[in-house]
Image (cartoon, rainbow, N blue to C red):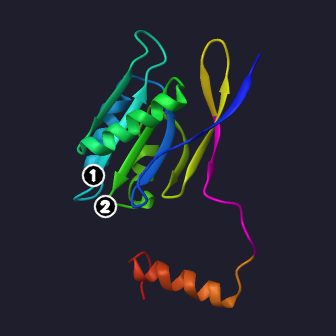
Amino acid sequence: MVRLISVKMEKDDDSQMIIGHSSFIKTIEDLYETMFSSVPGIKFGIAFSEASGPCLVRSEGNDNRLRKIAIKNILKIKAGHSFIIIFKNAYPINVTNGIKNIGEVTRIFCSTGNPVEVIIAKTKTGNSILGVVDGFSPKGVEDSAEVKKRRDFIREIGYKVK
């Protein structure tokens, strides 16, 4: 028997979140090193769920509040080999490729500042992340004013040359 559930993630409005899947206990230290070296001044908390042995939640980070939020969220998901990173003072674009390049990281479900719901399959053995709901459904198609607004924003935050 498989039961599907949706779990709403918690984070501050000004923080970002990455949810992924990995395959080895050293993930927690590799994630820490990648986050710490990615952007000067980044603040983050990480939680990783073991899938064997003592099946503990392992955590690291350089901000205790963000670390506690990551732990709270991973305990809501309860899926082995999953991880959550909650961070501030950076955008997902600054860290996602570094995380994807960690050898034991097998999947990134989302890298976002949006509200997130995690879709879980629950079995007798445990839980599995099937996917995420990242933000909200589209409300229409952009017009020329929205194209200009998008392009201006990207340049305003420094991701394109003016």
Residue 59 is situated, as x and y percent measured from the top left of the image, at 32, 31
CB-based contact (under 8 Å), mark 2 and mark 1: yes
Q: Determine the image quadrant of residue 109.
A: top right
Q: Is residue 131 above or below residue 79?
A: below
Residue 132 belongs to the span the image colors magenta: yes
Q: Determine the image quadrant of residue 149.
A: bottom right
**In-image side of 63 versus 131 (left or right):** left
Bounds of the magenta segment: 130-140
Q: Is residue 40 above or below residue 122?
A: below
Distance from Cα at disc 2 to Cα at disc 1:
6 Å
**Residue in the picture at 52% in, 43% down:** 9
Q: Residues within 10 Å of mark 2 (few under 14, many from 20)?
A: few
Q: Which residue is mark 1?
A: 43
The reply to whether residue 22 is in sight is no
Residue 89 is situated, as x and y percent measured from the top left of the image, at 31, 61
**Residue in the picture at 63% in, 84% down:** 146
Q: Secondary structure at mark 1?
A: strand
Q: Which residue is mark 2?
A: 89
Quarter of the image for the N terminus: give it.
top right
Q: Name the amino acid, label 1.
A: Lys
Residue 66 is situated, as x and y percent measured from the top left of the image, at 32, 45
Q: Earlier in the sequence, mark 2 or mark 1?
A: 1
**Residue in the picture at 44% in, 20% down:** 50
Q: Name the amino acid, label 2.
A: Asn
Nearer the observer, 116 or 38: 116
Q: Secondary structure at mark 2?
A: loop
